[in-house]
Image (cartoon, rainbow, N blue to C red):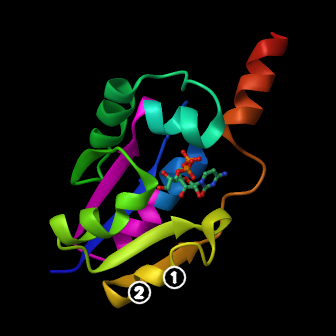
Amino acid sequence: MNVIITFGTFDVFHIGHLRILQRARQLGERLIVGISSDALNIQKKGRKPVYNQNERMDIVAGLKCVDSVFLEESLEKKADYIRQYSADTLVMGDDWAERFDSLSYLCEVVYFPRTPSISTTSIIEVVKKY
Ligand code: C2G
């Protein structure tokens, strides 16, 4: 069985998030998603997510293409998570291209192109104008 792992904040869940998860799931039989904790998101993006980590975990866990979720506490722990979940393939968006190539001794590392013209930040901007 091919186990796929991917990571993200998935705040204000949108179509770009769904597409990458569906594509990731097609690479194997099981998809495990590390959801960035609220604290990690503050480190990465300098702000608190709109939806808290429990809500974001519940939303992603509810998708048909996702088999299980866990909390990603640190960007540096990817190797530990890959081992813990016996992942065969790591999927990341191409905004992270090359950043995780050093993990290819542990599993296959695949980058998918981002869905154009949509992001959590752009949705927040649109909603602010209403
Ligand atoms: N994504 C996408 N298309 C978009 C927006 C996002 O394909 N238009 C993908 C990202 O490339 C990422 C996933 O959706 O693979 C989740 O996006 P974010 O929530 O922005 O996650 P990110 O902050 O990149 O977190 O450990 C790494 C990080 O936790 C990844």
Q: Quadrant of the N terminus?
A: bottom left
The answer to whether mark 1 and mark 2 are in CB contact below 8 A is: yes
Residue 43 % position (x, y)? 56, 38
51, above or below 59, in the image:
above
Question: Circle 1 — which element?
Answer: helix
Q: Residue 22 vs residue 4: left or right?
A: right
Question: Circle 2 — which element?
Answer: helix
Q: Nearer the viewer, residue 80 or 124?
A: 80
Residue 57 % position (x, y)? 32, 35
Give the amino acid type for the residue marked by disc 1 in the picture: Asp
Q: Nearer the viewer, residue 21 or 11?
A: 11
Residue wearing tag 2? 104
Give the residue at x 47% y 39%: 40
Residue wearing tag 1? 101
Q: Residue 87 vs residue 104: left or right?
A: left
Quadrant for residue 25, please give it. bottom left
98, above or below 59, in the image:
below
Give the residue at x 45% y 70%: 91
Give the amino acid type for the residue marked by disc 2 in the picture: Ser
Q: Is residue 13 visible?
A: no
Q: Which residues are magenta?
A: 21-38
